[in-house]
Amino acid sequence: MTAPPSLEVSRLAYAYPDGTQALFGVDFRVERGERVALLGPNGAGKTTLVMHLNGILTAGHGTVAVAGLPVGKRSLKEIRRRVGLVFQDPDDQLFMPSVREDVAFGPANLGITGEELERRVKDALERVGMLETIDRPPHHLSFGQRRRVAVATVLAMEPEILVLDEPSSNLDPASRRELAEILRGLDVTVLMVTHDLPYALELCERSLILSGGVIAADGPTRRILADADLLAAHRLELPYGFAAS
Amino acid sequence: MGAGHHHRLHRPGDTLVHRLPPQCKLVAVAGFALVVVATPREWFWAFGLYAVLLAAVAAAARVPAGFLLRRMVVEVPFVLFALAIPFIGFGERVTFMGLSLSVAGLWAAWNILAKATLGVVASVLLAATTEPRLILLGAQRLRLPPMLVQIAMFMLRYLDVILGEMRRMRVARESRGFVARDVRHIPVIARSAGALFIRSYERGERVHLAMLSRGYTGSMPVIQDLSVASRQWLVAGMLPGAALAVLLGSWGIA
């Protein structure tokens, strides 16, 4: 028997309480170890979809399963361990007074204590190259450093899949490259939500386009980015001077 | 911990006083304040001895007098109030340098000044030797409701973020030619304050989601070891203990 996919979303539909329908039946799978970009214009439902992956929003219709475990009320704790969500604004993610406590927050909630907790914290910070900031308050770090610590806060929970919301936003070119190197070096499944198309090409072999609440395209990133008509139909474009071929 | 250079109350160091667990220091300050308040105002020399005790703590913590004095500015409104009492008090009056002062008012002013000053100095010493978040963790160990501690923790963490937003909004206002000159500009400032409130509220929601995503179920995990050796309670007890000895001793004499 092969391992279940890291993420399996089927026929997922959702309407906000005010009646606005955001998702109209989303279907896709992410296999273990894959790095997949989820592309889509503003308002396509990307964030709504992300909120379903760890059960913050519950599906109106359809299912989400993480490594074979369906997202539901009873499985929430385990789901939140398996899905590491990195939010767009690190100031939202880093809420504890020191980097050490922030990275420890997730695993401590899982009941991990003592030396094992310390090991997880150091290990996660090591993986994003931020171990030397362990005793600093997060708000004294640069924006790029805070984003890396935000990644460490979920790595410490040893997730099955890392979900990043606009990981490259607001980063200067060097921080952007450094983050890419870190993400490429992680042996974990990654779903990256972005409209930074060159970043998707750099990091993900496969891309999905979410548009109008459905998956409008699914294929190799290079092929999708080369299809100018497809991109244009979903309000996506490469930056000036770029051409994927 | 490389404590905030902007937490101006805290003065990092590694002295006996700095190393005491925060809950011990909190209890010591509260105990000291109680003894001071319980002392009759006529016992001048007891207050003098209390001041000597605080000076000894400051010396042990290597907190210079200038630092203490600057932090005591917070007391100024009370001082002004206390200074006004002898002028507005009733009853028997004395004349001093051509001013007619109420005797009862003078006593009341002395009482407020002496006790408030001792309390403020003790609190400033606590703040100078304890990181703000440790004070909160200490309070939690003393059974302050965890919800209050969490609220205060978030205030500590997000103060800078919110001040930053406030600054950006001010810059945005001024970049478009706004200068607050008189009362007619109050509505603009008020609307900015409202927008700031809503932004902070929305940030609160996002932070809550981030917490839920990492398994938050209502209580903050405390990873700092805050256990206390009985020896440390003894050390912390020296300040209120000595003050109590002064008080009881004075009782014997009076």
Image: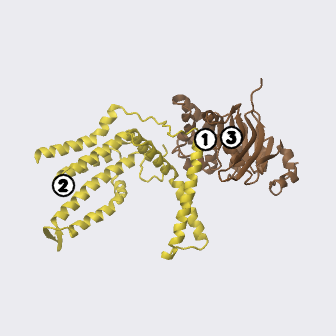
Instruction: Tell which circle, 1 or 2, labels the residue nearer the N-terminal end.
Output: 2
The quarter of the displayed image where residue A26 is located:
top right
Under tag 2, what secondary structure?
Answer: loop
Is A71 in front, or is B111? A71
Q: In the rendered image, what is the letter of the chain coloured yellow?
A: B
What is the x, y in percent for residue A162?
Answer: 68, 39
Within-10-Å neighbours for mark 1: few <14, some 14–19, many 20+: many
Q: Residue, x 56% and y 33% (percent of image)?
A: A110
Dot label at residue B41: 2
Q: Which residue is mark 3?
A: A53
What is the x, y in percent for residue A21?
Answer: 72, 51
Under tag 1, what secondary structure?
Answer: helix
Amino acid at dot 2: Arg
Is A165 in front, or is A218? A218
Is A26 in front, or is B57? A26
Give the side of residue A60 with respect to residue B43, left or right: right
Within-10-Å neighbours for mark 2: few <14, some 14–19, many 20+: some
Q: Which residue is mark 1?
A: B213
What is the x, y in percent for residue A47?
Answer: 69, 48
**Disc 3 sits on a residue from what chain?**
A
User: Are circles 3 and 1 on residues that touch, CB within 8 Å?
Assistant: no
Q: In the rendered image, what is the letter of the chain coloured brown?
A: A
Q: Residue, x 71% and y 40% (percent of image)?
A: A183
Protein image colouring: by chain
Label 2 in the same subunit as label 3:
no
The quarter in which the N terminus of chain A is drawn is top right
Gap between marks 2 and 3, in whole Å?
66 Å
Amino acid at dot 1: Ser
Gap between marks 1 and 2, in whole Å?
56 Å
- The vertical placement of B176 against B140, above or below, is below
